[in-house]
């Protein structure tokens, strides 16, 4: 089975995004995700979304964009584990990984409802 990992891998090398945690910045970053050579990688965006989610969970607040941010973070992890073997993940340059652009389009639509 491809997803049965024995061993570990560590994701590192993302760029910290210094934006406040709010829906407008989430939308901004999701739109950035559609740009092939944008300022931030999909890895950077996924990490920011994880921090966004944790920020509001720790404060026991359900912010408007939490569901979308949580989905971005979870889909990033699922995408990695479903697409790459453990050996590949152990040496992968995560900054080169791109999620499908359709996902970013759907997340933006979800926030604009």
Image (cartoon, helix red, strand yellow):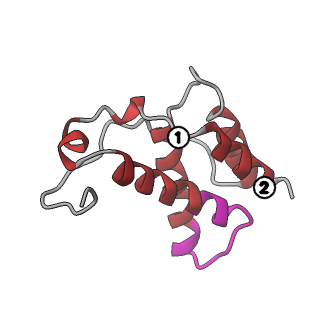
Q: Is residue 33 above or below residue 23?
A: above
How dense is the environment of label 2, judged by Cα within 10 Å: few (below 14), some, or many (20 and up)? some
| Distance from Cα at disc 2 to Cα at disc 1 | 18 Å
Residue 65 locus on image (x, y percent): 70, 61
Q: Is residue 74 left or right of residue 10?
A: right
Q: Residue furthest bottom?
A: 60
Residue 93 locus on image (x, y percent): 31, 31
Element on which disc 2 rests: helix
Residue 41 locus on image (x, y percent): 50, 32
Say how many tags the image has: 2
Q: Residue furthest top?
A: 37
Q: Residue furthest left?
A: 7
Element on which disc 1 rests: loop
> In the figure, residue 15 lies in which quadrant?
top left
Q: Is residue 19 magenta?
A: no
The quadrant of the image that shows the C terminus is: bottom right
Q: Residue furthest right?
A: 113
Name the residue: 31% across, 45% down: 84
Q: Give the mark toward the camera: 2 or 1.
A: 1
Q: Is residue 39 above or below residue 77?
A: above
Along the polypeptide, which appears first: circle 2 or circle 1?
1
How dense is the environment of label 1, judged by Cα within 10 Å: few (below 14), some, or many (20 and up)? some
Q: Residue 111, which numbered label?
A: 2
Q: Residue 99, which numbered label?
A: 1
Residue 26 locus on image (x, y percent): 67, 48
Q: Is residue 60 magenta?
A: yes
């Amino acid at each position: 089975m491809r997803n049965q990992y024995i061993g570990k891998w560590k994701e590192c090398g993302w760029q910290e995004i210094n934006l406040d945690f709010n829906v407008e910045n989430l939308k901004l970053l999701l739109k950035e995700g559609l740009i092939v050579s944008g300022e931030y990688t999909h890895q950077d965006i996924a990490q920011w979304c994880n921090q966004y989610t944790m920020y509001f969970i720790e404060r026991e607040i359900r912010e408007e964009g939490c569901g979308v941010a949580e989905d971005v973070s979870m889909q990033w992890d699922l995408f990695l584990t479903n697409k790459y073997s453990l050996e590949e993940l152990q040496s992968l340059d995560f900054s080169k990984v791109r999620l499908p652009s359709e996902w970013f389009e759907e997340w933006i639509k979800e926030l604009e409802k």
